[in-house]
Image: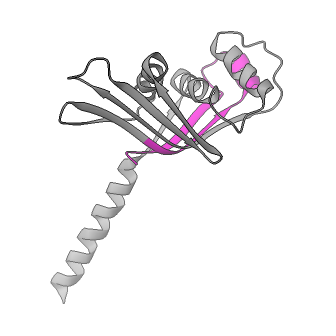
């Protein structure tokens, strides 16, 4: 009986640590970059919100955006190859559809996701980055203060 309780305790600690290890976050410039790269493909954002995010990312913090901007994606999955050097693709999944990227656009998302802390996994000549439940919040008012705040993202890595 005692060993069964120890086994259950050990298993629950392992599961808790494993699930905690898959959660990730980014803040500051990495979060702004990730939000900006994803925002341009998001069907949930209004054109004015996309323009505001692009403007902030381009260094124009004085853009007249009002209120917080939320950039979300249900899933992102990027693949590159270290064998076929021309192979790079990403798929962004949103509540209302998917967007497939190739070439430069896929490379931009892959590199930005890595910068934001989404880990790459490798398998037989390929590199894969994936995350689910991406939620980024941009606060233009705080970003304007240029103190490093106003941008944050959370995600579940490896899904």
The quarter in which the N terminus is drawn is: bottom left
Question: Residue 150: horizontal and vertical position, in percent?
Answer: 66, 27
The residue at 37%/24% (across/down) is: 88
17 left or right of 42 in image: left
Residue 135 highlighted magenta (yes or no): yes
**Residue 147 image offset from top left, x and y in percent:** 63, 18
43 to the left or right of 130: right
**Residue 107 point in image, percent of width and height:** 42, 20
- What residue span does the magenta drawing correspond to? 131-159
Query: From what the image shows, is residue 144 above or below residue 154?
Result: above
Quadrant for residue 113, please give it: top left
**Is 131 drawn above or below residue 111 in the view shown?**
below
> 58 left or right of 129?
right
Quadrant position of residue 97: top right
Counting every numbered tag in the picture gives 0
Residue furthest bottom in the image: 1
Relative depth, front residue between 72 and 146: 72
Q: Is residue 85 placed above or below 116 in the rendered structure?
A: above
Q: Is residue 129 visible?
A: yes
**For this rendering, which residue is in front, 110 or 65?**
110
């Amino acid at each position: 009986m005692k060993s069964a309780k120890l086994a259950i305790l050990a298993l629950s600690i392992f599961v808790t640590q494993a699930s905690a290890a898959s959660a990730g976050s980014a803040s500051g410039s990495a979060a702004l970059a990730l939000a900006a790269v994803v925002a341009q493909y998001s069907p949930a954002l209004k054109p004015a919100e996309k323009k505001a995010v692009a403007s902030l990312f381009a260094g124009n913090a004085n853009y007249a955006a009002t209120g917080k901007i939320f950039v979300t994606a249900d899933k992102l999955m990027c693949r590159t190859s270290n064998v076929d050097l021309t192979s790079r693709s990403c798929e962004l999944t949103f509540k209302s559809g998917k967007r497939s990227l190739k070439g430069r656009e896929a490379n931009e998302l892959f590199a930005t996701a890595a910068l934001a802390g989404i880990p790459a996994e490798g398998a037989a000549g390929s590199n894969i980055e994936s995350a689910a439940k991406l939620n980024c919040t941009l606060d233009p008012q705080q970003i304007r203060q240029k103190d490093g705040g106003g941008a944050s993202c959370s995600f579940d890595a490896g899904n």
